[in-house]
Image (tube, rainbow, N blue to C red):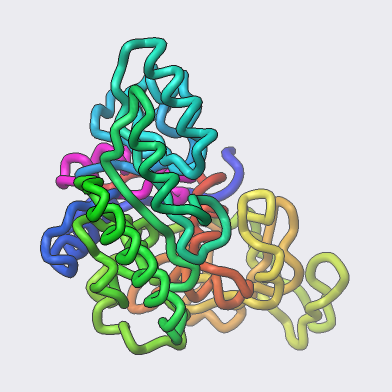
Amino acid sequence: MQRGAIAEIDLAAIAGNFREIKKITNNKKVIAVVKADAYGHGSEAVAKRLVESGADFLSVAFCDEAKALRLAGIKAPIIVLFDPDPKDVLDYNLIPVVSDKKVALSLSTEAEKRRRVLSVHIKIDTGMGRLGIIQNTAEDVVSIASMKGLIIDGLMSHFSDADAGDLTFAKLQISRFKDLIKTLAEKNLNPPIYHMANSAAVISLSESYFNAVRPGLLLYGASPFELSDINFSSIISRFTQAMSIKTRLVALRKVPAGTPISYGRTFVTKRESLIGVMSIGYADGYCRLFSNNAEVLVRGGRIPVVGKVCMDLTMIDLTDIKHLATETDEVIIMGRQGDEFISANELAKRANTISYEILTSLGRFAQKRYLN
């Protein structure tokens, strides 16, 4: 018996979400972000479908992720955001993001050594405060452009809060980026690709599109906004969540009133109850904060999680289910069953986190099955 959950990944949904992004952005180039194993969806299968769908670039965090895609036979341009190891970049024909002159020099040295010309994208810190050129910006970009073996094919930045209700700071970041583009143009430096828009900005900030967008979460059909934010609900409704998480019951137990359930006795039955024991726990990415604080779907109904989530198992109260449950019943942790739907955003709100963490945590440990 295999432990944990099954993640069903709808590749047709991901392709549909990609097409929707193309429509919204008026057919801008798309840099499809497939880092962190495609947000838990499986980078190789997802990357292949996105390339088939017309993605202009793929983007990953680290060179190891890019190497895995190359070894899987993916030939599309791959941008590496955070780990521009010169040897890997050249060995696997990758596009490094350069965040400072020191990194640029190491890439230049290796490119010259191999008598190669390397395409790079330059990252500008317009307000994220994480990585990117932040002082003497125009001068540093011009300096990098003069380095042997390098050609600047892209200029990028990253939003700190394009998903916020107040977009004032995001618009300031756009203004800073535009000012730099203008300054560089005056110095006859005009990279062919400019990109800044993440998933939230694709929805909320059309002025950030430039000539390429860089969506991640939206490709997988989850909202980058809080559940309570209805400003963009009509647009978000056009996207389909691609991941469903399913598990099974390992036991059904009839217990009397007054029975404590799980560690710490945080739930005690008030009546004779039917308790189901699910084959999923925090070791499988099911957050411990779901203890007494989440629902699952069984036979089309919402069923509460009771007691503390354990390492390998979690309990649910099936007492009020309309039709008697059996141990063969499928349990939906996230996804749709009948008319009910549990989204990544709903689980994120219950756990006081973001949907990114829900998808990567559950997707990381689950056995994946691909649809369409």
Q: Is residue 41 magenta?
A: yes
Closer to the camera, 150 or 351? 150
Q: Is residue 126 left or right of residue 242?
A: right
* Above or below: residue 230 compared with residue 107: below
Please indicate whether residue 146 sits to the left or right of residue 134 in the image.
left
Q: Residue 129 in the image: x percent, y percent?
A: 57, 61
- Magenta stretch, main secondary structure, is helix
* Coordinates of residue 227 in the picture (x, y in percent): 45, 82
Whether residue 308 is visible to the viewer of this picture, yes or no, is yes
Instruction: Say whether residue 361 is left or right of residue 121.
Output: right
What residue range appears in magenta? Answer: 32-55
In the image, what residue occupies the spot 60% across and 77% down? Answer: 350
Residue at 50%, 66% in the rendered image: 127
Residue at 47%, 77% (x, y): give it: 323
Residue that lies at the very extreme toward the right in this rendered image: 264
Q: Nearer the viewer, residue 108 or 346?
A: 108
Which residue lies most toward the top here?
114
Q: What count of labels does the image hold?
A: 0
- Which quadrant of the figure contains the N terminus? top right
